[in-house]
Structures are given as C-alpha cells and as structure tokens.
Image: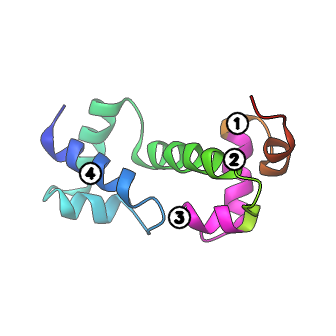
Amino acid sequence: MDRRVAGIIRLIDKNLDQDISLKKASRMANLSYNYFAALFRKETGKRFGEYLREKRIARAQSLLRNPGREIKEVCFLTGYRSIHSFYRDFKKITGRTPGQFKKQPKS
C-alpha cells in the first residue's frame, strides 16, 4: 500500500472523533486533492468518505455494545456533528438504526 495512504488510514483510525476531510487528508499527504482521492480509492477500493463512514460506524457499533453509552454520545464520539447524519449512515451501513442495534441481544 502507498505509504501516504497508509499514513492517512492510521490518522483516521486514531482520530475518528475529529473532523477529517478529504481536503485535509490530501494536504497532510502533500498531494493534490484529485490525485489523493484517486490514489486512496485505488489503494482501498473505497472513496474517502465511504471509508471514513464505515470506520466510524464500526467504532459506533463497538461503543453501543456498552449499555452505559447513549446513542447521542456515541454519535459525537465517532466524529459525527449531526445526529441525523449518524442515524442515516448507521442504517445504510448496518441495515438497522442505532436504537435497534443497541437493543439486540449481545452474542
């Protein structure tokens, strides 16, 4: 994997609660916006935003397994600034709402 993309992936993993944009990531990789977007997709098989959303929702699922965590809290801990966006992405990726996921029996 390209070292610049690998570095951005590590950054994403460590900073899911932060505002991470393709524009910021391309600047950090010292590449043009369009080139970085194409390189990221080539290396990961996903668009930057799609990759970021999937990582955030995976983290949200992990946090929601803790019965003491509220959905709104998890929303903000995973970098979402809008509860509506969080619900939309969660349902699109998992097929369930965060509330449905939280209520399911733990295995």
Q: Residues within 10 Å of mark 1 (few under 14, many from 20)?
A: some
Q: Quadrant of residue 6?
A: top left
**Residue at image location 34% in from the left, 32% down from the top:** 44
How far, Cα to Cα, is label 4 from label 1? Answer: 25 Å
Report the span colored magenta. 73-92
Q: CA distance from mark 2 to mark 1?
A: 6 Å
Query: For this rendering, which residue is in front, 95 or 45?
Result: 95
- Specify whether residue 80 is in view: no
Residue 14 screen position, x and y as percent:
36, 56
Q: Could you tell me the amino acid type at mark 4?
A: Ile
Is residue 96 among what the camera can see?
yes
**Secondary element at tag 3:** loop
Tell me if residue 90 is in the magenta stretch: yes
- The CA distance from mark 4 to mark 2 is 23 Å
Query: Which residue matches tag 1?
Result: 94
Residue 106's spot in the image, x, y percent? 77, 34
- Report which residue position mark 2 lands on: 90
Q: Earlier in the sequence, mark 3 or mark 4?
A: 4
Callout 2 touching callout 1 (CB < 8 Å): yes
- Residue nearest the observer in this picture, 54 or 58: 58
Q: x and y percent of residue 51 in the render?
A: 45, 42
In the displayed structure, 64 sits above or below 77; it is: above
- The quarter of the image holding the N terminus is top left
Q: Which residue is mark 4?
A: 8
Residue that carries the numbered disc 3 in the rendered image: 79
Magenta stretch, main secondary structure, is: helix
